[in-house]
Amino acid sequence: MAGSVIGELEGLGSLGREMGRRARQDGLMLIWRAQVREVRHVLVRDGRPEDTSHTSSSGHGVHVFTDEGRTALASRDDFAPETAIDLLRRAANAARRSAALGSRSSALPQLDPVVESAIPASAEAFDRLDLSLLSARLAEIEREVAGKVAGVSLRVSFLADLDGWRIMRSDGTDVTFVMPRCVLRLGATSTGRDGTHGVGVAISGPDPGLPWDDAEVAVFLRRAIRAAQLARDLPDAPAHPAGSFPLVIDYALAKGLAHEAFGHAAEADGFRSSILAADGRFRSGERVGPSHVSIVDEPVAGDHAWQPFSANGIRRERAVVVDHGRLRDGLSDPWSASEGGVRLTGSARAGSFRAPPLPRMSNIRIEVDDPLAAPGSFDDYGPAEVRDLLVSAGILKRHPRVVFLSGYSGGQVNTATGDFVFNCKAIYELSGDGVRLHKPAIFSGSMFGALGAIREAFGPLVLDALGTCGKWGQSVPSSGGSHYFLFLEPDPLVRIGGKD
Amino acid sequence: MGIALERWIEAVRSGRPGGVGAEAWSVYAVERRRLSIGTRDGATGNAHTPLRVSESLAARYVVAWEDGKISRGSLERRQIADDPDAALERARDAAYVDPDAARVSGPARFPDVELHDDRVVGLIDGDLDLVGRRLARVRETLAANDFGTWSGSIAAAESRSRLVTSIGLDVEDRATSAGWHVSFDGEWGDGFSARSLDDEPAFELRLNRAAEIVRLLGQPQPAMPPGVHPVVVHPHVVERLFMATLLQSLEGSSVAHGDGFFKLDEFGSDRPALRDDLSLTLDPTKPLRNGSYRFTAEGVPAGRCELVSNGCLRTPILDLKYANRLGLDPTPVPYGMDTLDLGASESVSESNAYAMAEGGALILSVLGVHTLDPASGDFSLSAPQALILGSGGPQGRIRTTISGNIFAVLRDKTLHLVRYPNEPTPGLLFPCHLNPT
């Protein structure tokens, strides 16, 4: 039996075709976006459920383009045929009237029709998720962490989000994709002599059976216990001095660097003001970093930010934003590619059926040529083991003190100026004397300075650092990573905040 | 005509999913229509910023079941109108034990609060002249200042809401909202949002001030050395950094679980948690503010509520669940910063503040607020849009990081609140650690 989200999307074909037929009749190009989404969420604290919910949201967006290149988007939260047809009429009127507001006319893109679907096997399991059993399982996980780290306030949550889309265009395109996303999360908070601190940790996967997957839960528990210990220790840790330092960042922070510093500036809808563009066109071919460093964005199967088609019904392609130090691809959609001087990569995503799609990242990573070995899994590395890696690579001889930024807790960029900022979960000072914990502080600076500072990488790629991107008020899942660890030489344009 | 919730209400009254009926329930529905248009890098109404019209109907419900379990969640239009029985079964499937959340409100006296402006309705109905005039003024300002580009948006919405409970509450309301935002050269911007449109002089004042600030940001100045300097933090930053953190720390859930900055035993104590002349008052009965309302989604009447007075914590912000858990009365909740009043025994004018902070900096925006840990109050942020304060006020641009602790600032004896024209939130003047880059 098809799952409820999938079944609903499958039943929308005739409405979508009728909308397309009427649009063609009126001389309009139509992109019709239907979304059906089901979200199940359980939060457990102190061994009992604090919140449990199962919500659904659905509706459609009618995005029309007149033959003069004017556009409007009308949306409503149901699929009733009569109101849908009325919505099309109102969208067409709005598009025609927008000329009076000085709206910009854009040439209609010539696109190849696409008829495809992508529905991962795990999507059907969402309907079988029992929230009572889930609550009990999360309570077990919370107990296990609490048993290892006392005196810390814990909350464990699980989110199962099944996000289904059907995109139909008046040119015959009919694309269906369903994105299964599950996140198991722990938050730990502790109060010490010098204040209160919170630390979060999460793992993700496409299968709602994640909390019962022994291997995944083992990884989660390892990270959760470490996070709880960190929450316990941080309140009494000193602040780190501000300034420029030799740095080690983990793959989650490297994802933050790629996403905030370069990814956003490579989004082609912003080329009129992006530091990576001149006169609205991407500075393809220009050197922006060392020749051993590349930045790649592409949807990865099973990943938190996987989206195989754009919200305009175009297959999403791999984009090499920085190819061995030189700019190569922007992240583009049909309305920004040619104007921005980049190839079409089908990168548009929308936060919901109500929102206009914008070029954005999916899974973005920093790749470094010839990384140094880091045996075992990423989770085998605490700060002491990272210090051992630096010793074996001779880095602690080059720099007697190295600052290790661990864990990512969000970031932001100004694409016009190239200023970026992100925060970590903890700072460790690594030296010949050992390891010393400091409170987290902001890592900020110039994107070119940061990319140029990357020298060594350790270990294979890990691409599961997850987050949420809030570009222009639209939230979509993001993810990415890099090698286990990257080493950055000190650069005056890259600084840690904090106190002198 | 009110929102038709009767099918859902009938389903809750008569339904017995899994053989269990509802003992108490509430449902709060909002039906909204909205119009907006955006501009990105000078392109108004293109594929990324189209003229948008949208319609929505959604509801939040609480069902307290006979077996002591409760269900809380949301309903979408189709569930409310067409399929309430299936939605109720789903709600029952998600039921859990949480006795504190089982409370619903009864009838009460709700204050009259002005929430609706017919001019906003005209805009949603297609009278776009005002939008056209304002877009034209922004384009004129862009040209007059020789800026390269601008981005922004204008939006208007009308909503109807209805709250019904099993113990006799049935109340409705109508409200509008409108707002705009403009930024120049991707650097800095300003805007306004409320339940009514701002008038033309207020619009002009904000637009011209934004242009003046961006003009100054185009003039780099040598920065001061790293260290502690006087800073004036603009009201935009105060809202995003200071007020947001303060509100999060006052939230009932954070207080009840003990994982916020303020602990339960600090509330009601005579020992100040902030400087002893600081106050924070919520008043959602102010007319036509963004955060104005007559009743919360749970049926708590709007009213003036002292959260902090004389530096002492008076009450956490309590919805029904956390009021139950803590054995306290529920409070109104803040729906917007413009119904909160951060006050002190004295405040200074904007120009006086700039004079007092000469040699320091005006912080206009910060990057990375959402990355901070609100439980600690520590901040360490990049402020790429900052102006050095000279003898005549703001002079030219510096880039810096700022660091400190929000709660330490709010306890600082040398802190001054700074009144800005047309801003409900004050700026703050205090000594702050700066690391110019």
Image: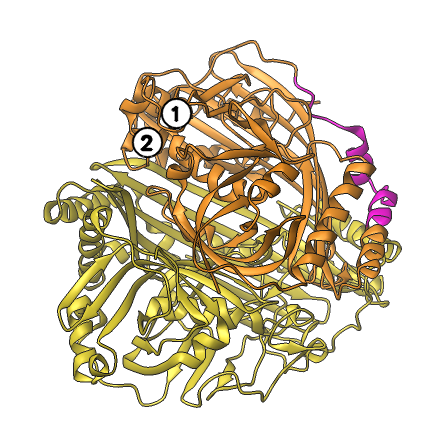
> In what element is the residue under mark 2?
loop
Q: Which residue is drawn at 62% across and 45% down?
A: A78
Label disc, if present, on residue B262 of the rendered structure: 2
| Image quarter of residue B307 | top left
Q: Residue at x 69, y 45 (%)?
A: B191
- Left or right of B358: which side holds B39? right
Please tell me which residue lies in front, A339 or B171.
Answer: A339
Residue A415 on image: x %, y %? 58, 67
Q: Colour of chain B?
A: orange
Pointer 1 with pointer 2, Cβ within 8 A: yes
Residue B355 on image: x %, y %? 61, 42
Q: Which chain carries label 1?
A: B
Q: In the rendered image, what is the letter of the chain coloured yellow?
A: A
Please tell me which residue lies in front, A11 or A128.
Answer: A128
Q: Which residue is drawn at 28% across and 45% down?
A: A197
- Magenta stretch: residue B119 in it? yes
Mark 1: few, some, or many residues within 10 Å (few <14, many ≥20)? many
Circle nearer the N terminus (1, 2): 2
Q: Nearer the viewer, mark 1 or mark 2?
A: 2
The magenta segment is: B113-134
Label disc, if present, on residue B316 of the rendered structure: 1
> In what element is the residue under mark 1?
loop
Q: Report the amino acid beneath label 2.
A: Phe
